[in-house]
Amino acid sequence: MIRLPGTGTLSAPDRRALSLLTDLARLIPVADAAADVVTIDLTDRPPRFDSLRSWRDAGWGIAPTDGVIHVARSALRLVADVVDAARERTASTRDRFGRVPSTENAIVAEGLEREPIVSKAAAALRAAAGAAAGRRPLRLAAPWPDGRRWAVAVTHDLDVVEWWPAFTALRLAELARKGAWGRAARTGMAAIGAIGRNPVFQGIAALLEMERDRGVHSTWFVLCGTPAWRTFLAGDLTYRPEATPARAVLEAVLRDGHAIGLHGSFATMTVSAAMTEQRSRLAALARRDVAGVRQHFLRFDLERTPRLMRDAGFQYDSTAGFADRNGFRLGVCDVVPAWHAEGQGSPLAEVPFAWMDRALSKYRNVEDPGAWVTDALELASACRAVEGLWVGVWHPNVTPPLGFPDAPAAYRRLLDGLSAGEPFVGTLDELVRWREARARLRIARVAPDGRVEVEGKSVVALEEPTR
């Protein structure tokens, strides 16, 4: 529970940053003006932080006293800049796919991308609330459903369905360039053994079986445009969503209770009609609403794409991650508002991913899937430490006949390693819905004996912090 400063005393970026920090900290705003609860006071000291490291080393600009948490305004500006990717918005360089290079990210520039720096600041704010409360009543929102202390979302980008030999050939060329002759030979043998079969669907079926055995429901992002030679050669649209192979994959995924999202084609980055048409087309094929989107190749215009997503009716995006490295692009491991998504429709949430298999094999020359999993579990540990959400991307075409002979065993190890930490595991759809319910929590009244009354009804439990 927390009493926030009046909105008239805050600039719009400060208001958004403070709202985000308190939400991430699980502190619930109190509407009861008479309640004796912890309040937040904004201070101009220190006047500014020179870097993210100086902010971290100075205790995040947060200092508790009796009944009050003092928060530096300059800290809020840093939070706003990091989560809003302010430095990336001013970058003039683009890579060959039209993406802002990761080196333009403020967190990468300081070598802190492996650290969920904003989520850590929120944890410090929560600790400060406990220190400031004294004998005052304090309740926190539960971090995740079912009493779990952190959460995991496994996601898959369905890039390959048809014409698998072409992708095997491309992968063999990639392995040859790297001099990975042993893997190339094993890939060739697996591909020969797959002739006359459907190794893509077989790989997906094996992946689904692993998830079914462990009670994992994942989120699948599906391409849903019309392919042409131009899009195929560009690596953009590579299969027909209405064709029998794609329909078979979609039906198998939905039958097991997984969620479906759009993998937006290159055109959807800036073309509103393409975004809207592809969402409608996928919804018709899946016979259900499509709540989420992730851009193919992570092609994203920071100013325009969020608005197109919102106007098309999406509830959340999960594009905010790095293509060429793993880590926390926005400094958070949680669900946050997509601040630059003004437009029609409901608010858009951003669910950043922290880890992707091909960020290592394609860009970092790490061909051992066992090393991918070690990297994934390290980042999962960082998420668990701040009671956050780990989102990872495993491509279902990462199979032996398509060039990844050790991948199935590694995926099994990944699922088991994540489950060992006892997270809540869910689809992005359900996690976003739950987090939005948590963000709406408000305390209507605090009784003299410390009992609290929540506004309306909520599925989110309250808990008392350990003091």
Image: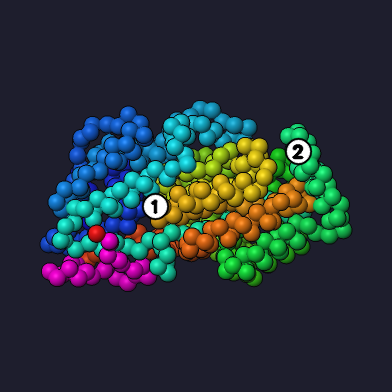
User: What's the coloring here?
Assistant: rainbow
Report the quarter where the C terminus lies.
bottom left
Q: Is residue 458 magenta?
A: yes
Asked if the stretch drawn in magenta spans residue 119, the answer is no
Residue 291 percent across, percent down from the top left: 52, 59
Which residue position is annotated with label 2? 180
CA–CA distance in space, label 2 to label 1: 38 Å
Residue at image position (33%, 33%) is 54
Element carrying mark 1 = loop
Q: Disc 2 marks which amino acid?
A: Ala
Residue visible at 19% across and 39% down in the picture = 43
Residue at x 59%, y 31% (from the top left corner): 95
Residue 248 is left or right of residue 15, and the answer is right
Q: Residues within 10 Å of mark 2 (few under 14, many from 20)?
A: few
The crowding category of the residue bearing disc 1, from other C-alpha atoms within 10 Å (few below 14, some 14 to 19, many at least 20), is many
Q: Is residue 329 above or below residue 344?
A: above
Q: Which residues are magenta?
A: 445-466
Q: Helix, strand or loop at disc 2?
A: loop
What residue type is disc 1 on? Val
Q: Position of residue 198 (x, y in %)?
A: 80, 59
- The residue nearer to you, when weighing 347 against 252, is 252
Residue, disc 1: 386
Q: Is residue 291 left or right of residue 87?
A: right
**In the rendered view of the protein, which quadrant contains the N terminus?**
bottom left
Q: x, y percentage for residue 11?
A: 26, 41
Residue situated in front as seen by the camera: 31 or 202: 202
Task: Report x, y in % for residue 205.
Answer: 71, 64
**SS assignment for the magenta stretch, majority:** loop
Task: Kindly identify the residue that appears in the image at 28 percent across and 61 percent down.
Answer: 465
Compared with residue 304, is residue 350 higher up or lower down, i.e. above or below? below
